[in-house]
Image: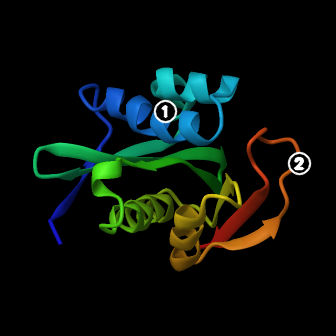
Amino acid sequence: MEKVEILPFSPELKPYFDSINRVWVEELFEIEPFDKEQLENPEKYVLDKGGEIIFAKIGNQVVGTVGLAKVDEKTYEMIKMGVDRSAQGKGVGRILGDAILEIAKEKGAEKVVLFTHSKLKAALSIYEKLGFKEVQLCNDKYVRCDLAMELDL
């Protein structure tokens, strides 16, 4: 497997947060107002509120990203995990997940939640391997969500 390098958010990488996530969201669902806010202004909606965004790079190509949004002092939400088609099946999602969960622990998180859809089979497999458990069906958090998962750290 090619070496995957994890990079922190920087202004140069910001466009990848939008472009990588926009592809899968638009292909399978539609961009919701909160997506537009997070994707176009991650500083305001994620980073300035105590969250993090990281990127995966293979060689010279940025191939994935994931965010961590602060919910409260002990809870964070894993958001916007996306992997470029060129890197799918190479373990990039799992590496991103492991890295963002380490960051959550460093921030003092006791729990990480996520909201997803049951048709995202590859993502669900990654979440389960990371230790997430299904906790409920989604109600009104996101239009495209039909299940919620959480992980106690």
Residue 43 lies, with reference to residue 132, above or below; the image says above
Which mark, by number, is residue 138?
none
**Pointer 1 local density, CA inside 10 Å: few below 14, some 14–19, many at least 20:** some
Compared across the picture, whether 136 is left or right of 106 comes to right
- Name the spot of residue 53 as percent of width and height, x first: 41, 43
Residue type, numbered disc 2 = Asn
Mark in front: 2 vs 1:
1
- Which quarter of the rendered picture does the C terminus lie within? bottom right
Instruction: Residue at 56% x, 33% y: name it.
Output: 26
SS at badge 2: loop
- Name the spot of residue 42 as percent of width and height, x first: 48, 28
Residue type, numbered disc 1 = Arg
Q: Extreme right residue here? A: 139
Q: Earlier in the sequence, mark 2 or mark 1?
A: 1
Of 44 and 89, nearer the camera is 89
Instruction: Residue at 39% x, 46% y: name it.
Output: 65
SS at badge 1: helix
- Which quarter of the rendered picture does the N terminus lie within? bottom left
Residue 13 lies, with reference to residue 86, above or below; the image says above
Residue at the spot of label 2: 139
User: What is the CA distance from the residue labelled 2 to the residue labelled 1?
Assistant: 23 Å
Instruction: Residue at 38% x, 59% y: name it.
Output: 96
Instruction: Residue at 46% x, 26% y: name it.
Output: 43
Compared across the picture, whether 70 is left or right of 98 comes to right
Colour scheme: rainbow
Which mark, by number, is residue 22?
1
- Name the spot of residue 102 as percent of width and height, x first: 42, 65
Q: Within the image, what quadrant is residue 111 found in?
A: bottom right
Residue 151 appears in the rendering = yes
